[in-house]
Image (cartoon, rainbow, N blue to C red):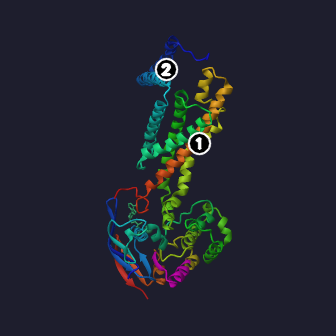
Amino acid sequence: MAQIAFQNVSYRRGGKEIVKNLSAEFAPGDFVSIVGPSGSGKSTFLRLCCHLISPTGGKILFHGKDMLRENPIEIRKKIRYCFQEPVLWGNTVEDNVAFPYRIRNRKADREKIVSLLSRFHMDESCLTHDVKSLSGGEKQRIALVRTLLFEPEVLLLDEATSALDADNAELVEKEIYRLNQKGVTVLWVTHNDAQSRKYANRLLTIENGQIQSREELK
Amino acid sequence: MNGAKISDASLLLASSLVVVSLLFSYFQKLRLEKETLVSVIRAVVQLFAVGYVLQWVFGLRSPAVTTLILLLMIFNAAFNAAKRGKGVRNGILISYLSILTGTGATLSVLVLSGAIRYEANQIIPIGGMIISNAMVAIGLCYRQLAGNFKSRRTEVEIKLSLGADLLPASRDILRDSIRTGMIPTIDSTKTLGIVSLPGMMTGLILAGTSPLMAIRYQILVTFMMLSTTAISSFLACFLAYRNFFNGRKQLDDGTSG
Ligand SMILES: Nc1ncnc2c1ncn2[C@@H]1O[C@H](COP(=O)(O)OP(=O)(O)OP(=O)(O)O)[C@@H](O)[C@H]1O
Ligand SMILES: [Mg+2]
């Protein structure tokens, strides 16, 4: 059974059909790259996946069950979306990485946080940094750490390396691939052609809210 | 009491002051003559009406009527505050409950502690002051809440996408909105007596109360305003924030689809 299945999904907003009659299936462990021109509906597609918005037509199934009937919070804990804009909040980096623990009523696991930061070439000292003083690339990596502190079943990435230099982008790619090898399904929206083919087993091209082409890789 | 006795004759003479303003407007071509006249007449009629009603109510010495008037004042305030919260469903009900609780709690403490008596001539003016203060405060809260949910939309959605429930996803916004509601009251508390003598104190002094007694009343009212705005702002924000989400715990999209 597919982990996530889109069945003729449409999403209409303000008189405009942003996603049109889209069908697709994703299996556990898939690594899917999603490409397409700006404004084609890629982010909207990811937002639909994690129940941040609901289809205005068709159905999305998660493990065969209509997502609309599931608890949205549980869905989002399993299907985790890392936004295109790495917005940070509060004063310090720590406020951000502590958030996933806070909503689970748990004490922040400092060891885990530091080890994850180091995987993205950052260290403990950055925890006290003012969020306003961070560079775009640092923000993006903090946002990734924030998303990954609790391992999801499905990871949705929206141009997760757009603000990173080549070295850091590769670091992130490897880390995501490592997660994928552990069984995490990855749907990754990217504008980078090389990146889209590096680790993925499938490549979807979205245009005008529809899947224009599907390509099996490897 | 020896102060504050104004005869009808002196009031009429004082009305010549309005003529000054009218002449000024006329010769300077401000075109404010009509508006000035209308507003002055309105003010006089309204105040006389209120004066007679209050006179009558004070004479009744009926706690039930006093309570009824208090509730009407709260309804009126709730109605006005709700106008500020256009995006808030059940705005009037939420405002009503918030102001009622804030005012009720505060007045209870003061009546039970013996600071004031539950009599129309004390409860109605004091109630009026704190109710209107609470009204302004929650109006500000609603505006800030709506503005925040709009401008910090991505932040809220990221929090939701991390698996947060509505309250943790909104907490920072709630905090900020409650602060916004309370800050004017706190600010005016800081400058009390330095920048301005509050209207009530001025009135008491004019009516012959000693300044030392007048400030006691002012201090009391200040405490009341602080606690009422705190309670009302807190309640209004906590009752209203869920309105910005739909039943699927999604941030409602501003546009209609
Ligand atoms: N809430 C909304 N209301 C109205 N229109 C919207 C809304 N969200 C998205 N859109 C429109 O839907 C279209 C698709 O948006 P989306 O963000 O999904 O594109 P995208 O493929 O992610 O683009 P990019 O590569 O630039 O990130 C755009 O034309 C956008 O303006
Ligand atoms: Mg996008």
Magenta-tinted stretch: A172-189
Disc ID at residue B227: 1
Q: In this view, does B237 lie to the left or right of B256?
A: right
- Amino acid type assigned to the residue bearing label 2 in the image: Ser
Question: Is residue A177 part of the magenta span, yes or no?
Answer: yes
Disc ID at residue B83: none
| Quarter of the rendering occupied by the C terminus of chain B | bottom left
Which of discs 2 and 1 lies nearer the camera? The answer is 1
> Could one spot residue A130 in this view of the protein?
yes
The foreground one among B227 and B112 is: B112
Residue identified by numbered label 2: B21
| Quarter of the rendering occupied by the N terminus of chain B | top right
Vertical placement of residue B244 versus A104, above or below: above
Residue B181 percent location from the top left of the image: 54, 45
Q: What element carries label 1?
A: helix
The foreground one among B47 and A213 is: B47
Residue A149 percent location from the top left of the image: 57, 73
Vertical placement of residue B241 versus B106, above or below: below
Q: Distance between the residues labelled 2 and 1?
A: 40 Å
Q: If you read the primary sequence from the N terminus, does the residue marked by circle 2 or circle 1 appear first?
A: 2
- The outermost residue toward the top is B9
Which quadrant of the view contains residue B45? top left
- Amino acid type assigned to the residue bearing label 1 in the image: Ser
Vertical placement of residue B107 versus A8, above or below: above
Image quarter for ligand 1 equals: bottom left
